[in-house]
């Protein structure tokens, strides 16, 4: 996690993707999200972004095929 008092977009995206597993990184990140209104808002924005990218990737790989 970055040393900036606010969480980076990268850290928030990694959190949403479940990539933050180390307790030493996870606990302060979650505490910040719970205690900071801006952090919570940015975490929600990151969640919307990550979920949209997942949906787009799924649609791209599993979506309808072009007619031949």
Image (cartoon, grey):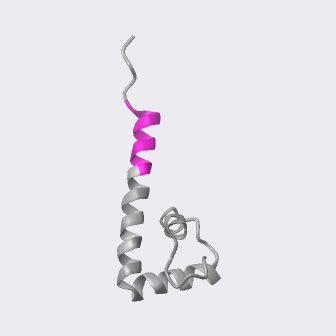
Residue ranking furthest to the front: 4
Q: How many marks?
A: 0
Where is 41 relative to 65, above or below?
A: below
In magenta, the rendered stretch is: 53-63
Is residue 34 inside the magenta stretch?
no
Q: Horizontal placement of 7 versus 41: left or right?
A: right
At horizontal 47% and vertical 85% (from top left) the residue drawn is 32
At horizontal 40% and vertical 89% (from top left) the residue drawn is 35
Q: Horizontal placement of 20 versus 45: left or right?
A: right
Q: Horizontal placement of 38 versus 26: left or right?
A: left
Q: Dividing the picture into quarters, in which one does residue 37 lie?
A: bottom left
Residues 7 and 51: in front is: 7
Question: Residue 54 at what x, y percent from top left?
Answer: 44, 49
Residues 8 and 35: in front is: 8
At horizontal 37% and vertical 66% (from top left) the residue drawn is 45
* Magenta stretch: dominant secondary structure: helix
Q: Dividing the picture into quarters, in which one does residue 3 lie?
A: bottom right
Question: Residue 66 at what x, y percent from top left?
Answer: 38, 19
Question: Residue 20 at what x, y percent from top left?
Answer: 58, 70
At horizontal 50% and vertical 64% (from top left) the residue drawn is 13
The N terminus sits in image quarter: bottom right
Residue ranking furthest to the top: 68
The C terminus sits in image quarter: top left
Is residue 59 inside the magenta stretch?
yes
């Amino acid at each position: 996690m970055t040393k900036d008092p606010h969480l980076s977009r990268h850290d928030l995206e990694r959190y949403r993707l479940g990539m933050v597993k180390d307790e030493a990184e996870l606990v302060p990140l979650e505490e910040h999200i719970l205690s900071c209104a801006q952090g919570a808002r940015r975490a929600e924005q990151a969640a919307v972004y990550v979920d949209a990218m997942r949906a787009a990737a799924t649609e791209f790989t599993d979506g309808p095929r072009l007619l031949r």
